Image (cartoon, helix red, strand yellow):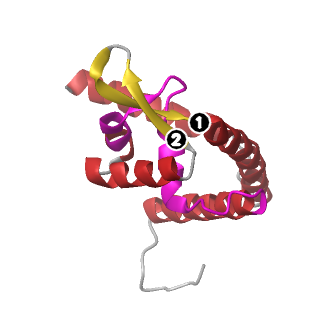
């Protein structure tokens, strides 16, 4: 990261840059594990799909993407054998996006790699003198924010 004295570097920018680097590391590791067709753009799909399937509209909402953009990602991953669409048992008109066997294997690989990536980053933070449970801190802050949003709605 270059130092630019005239440019204010916000915490938001630092979080975004760190998250981007972590996802890039994950993609590199997935490529090395044989999933060469994965890109950083696919991460939000796998991150937000439920074990029993998820509607495309829900995936789009969770990721902040348009329905059309999410549909294109799902189409791509479906053609490559990671996802499939099935009828929603609660509403036959709707369809759920499910992981295939290949998709579940990719997710298991990703989860293992993510654990290693997170451990490495947490070690970097600890070496920099940040000795706190970062996951617990972030989760607590997010829960507090969500609770505040519910009380003001």
Closer to the camera in the image, 85 or 60: 85
Which quarter of the picture shows residue 57? top left
Q: Quadrant of the N terminus?
A: bottom right
10 Å crowding of disc 1: few (<14), some (14-19), many (20+): some
Residue 61: x %, y % from top left: 31, 40
Q: Which residues are magenta?
A: 32-60
Closer to the camera in the image, 10 or 82: 82
Mark 2 and mark 1 residues within 8 Å of each other at the beta carbon: yes
Closer to the camera in the image, 39 or 102: 102
Q: Is residue 1 left or right of residue 57?
A: right
Mark 1 residue element:
loop
Closer to the camera in the image, 81 or 1: 81
What residue does disc 1 label?
Answer: 100
Q: Is residue 45 left or right of residue 59?
A: right
Q: CA distance from mark 2 to mark 1?
A: 5 Å
Q: Residue furthest left?
A: 153
Looking at the image, is 121 positioned above or below residue 100?
below
Residue 97: x %, y % from top left: 44, 34
Residue 12 is one of the magenta-drawn residues: no
What residue does disc 2 label?
Answer: 83
């Amino acid at each position: 990261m270059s130092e630019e004295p005239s440019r204010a570097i916000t915490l938001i920018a630092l979080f975004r840059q760190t998250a981007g680097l972590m996802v890039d590391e994950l993609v590199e590791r997935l490529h090395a594990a044989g999933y060469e067709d994965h890109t950083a753009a696919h991460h939000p799909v796998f991150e937000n799909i439920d074990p029993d399937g998820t509607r495309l509209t829900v995936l789009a909402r969770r990721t902040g993407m348009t329905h059309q953009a999410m549909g294109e990602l799902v189409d791509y991953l479906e053609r490559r054998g990671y996802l499939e669409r099935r009828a929603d048992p609660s509403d036959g008109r709707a369809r759920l996006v499910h992981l295939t066997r290949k998709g579940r294997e990719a997710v298991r690989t990703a989860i293992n790699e993510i654990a290693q990536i997170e451990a490495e980053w947490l070690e970097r933070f600890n070496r920099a003198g940040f000795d706190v449970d970062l996951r617990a801190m972030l989760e607590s802050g997010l829960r507090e924010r969500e609770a505040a949003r519910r009380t003001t709605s």
